[in-house]
Amino acid sequence: MRIPSITCIGLIGLITTIFAITLPTVAAETGAAGLWEGQIYFTNTEAKIELQIQPSVDHPSGALILPGRNGQGLPLEKLAITGSNISFEINNGRAVAGFKGTINPDGKTIRGDFVQAGQTFVFELNRKLGELTAKAPGAGKDFPKQ
């Protein structure tokens, strides 16, 4: 039985529309996934940090590793990835700090603002190859190598 060409064209158009709507969302939600390392630039010093984001379309998660914590990561709270924008909070038990940044179009850097106790500082992260190592809820132990 021959399928009318108008039906085939309509089906192809529908499939194309579905991919056009869903693919950017999936890419945006997983584009931040992976390992990132860099620093927060304070007034007179820098602090090294490592960000680990577990890939997930529905609910990305991860951890931030700070110096002096023996590889222990602080879980990311309120993690939101929308397009090239990323934001999250960390809580070290004494204070909450917020990060709001933008993923560079080439996908290799994140740059933004770190806010704690009413003060704002710049942070910058570079994508790193490797596996997640943080021991924090949601940090993912079997993160694939890139």
Image (spheres, grey):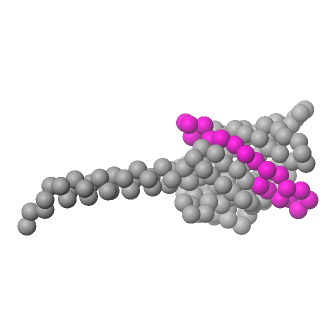
Q: Determine the image quadrant of residue 120.
A: top right
Query: Does 9 sit left or right of 115 as displayed?
Result: left
Query: Does 110 sit left or right of 17 as displayed?
Result: right
Q: Nearer the viewer, residue 130 or 98?
A: 98
Q: Nearer the viewer, residue 33 or 7?
A: 7
Q: Quick check: can you spot residue 137?
A: yes
The residue positioned 56% from the left and 54% from the top of the image is 29
Question: From which residue to which does the magenta span run?
Answer: 89-108
Give yes or no for residue 102 being in the magenta stretch.
Answer: yes
The residue positioned 48% from the left and 49% from the top of the image is 24
Q: Determine the image quadrant of residue 12.
A: bottom left
- x, y percentage for residue 78? 72, 59
The quadrant the N terminus occupies is bottom left
Give yes or no for residue 59 being in the magenta stretch.
Answer: no
Q: Nearer the viewer, residue 128 or 74?
A: 74
- x, y percentage for residue 72? 78, 59
The outermost residue toward the left is 1
- x, y percentage for residue 10? 25, 56
- x, y percentage for residue 122? 78, 37
Q: Determine the image quadrant of residue 127.
A: top right
Q: Quick check: can you spot residue 143?
A: no
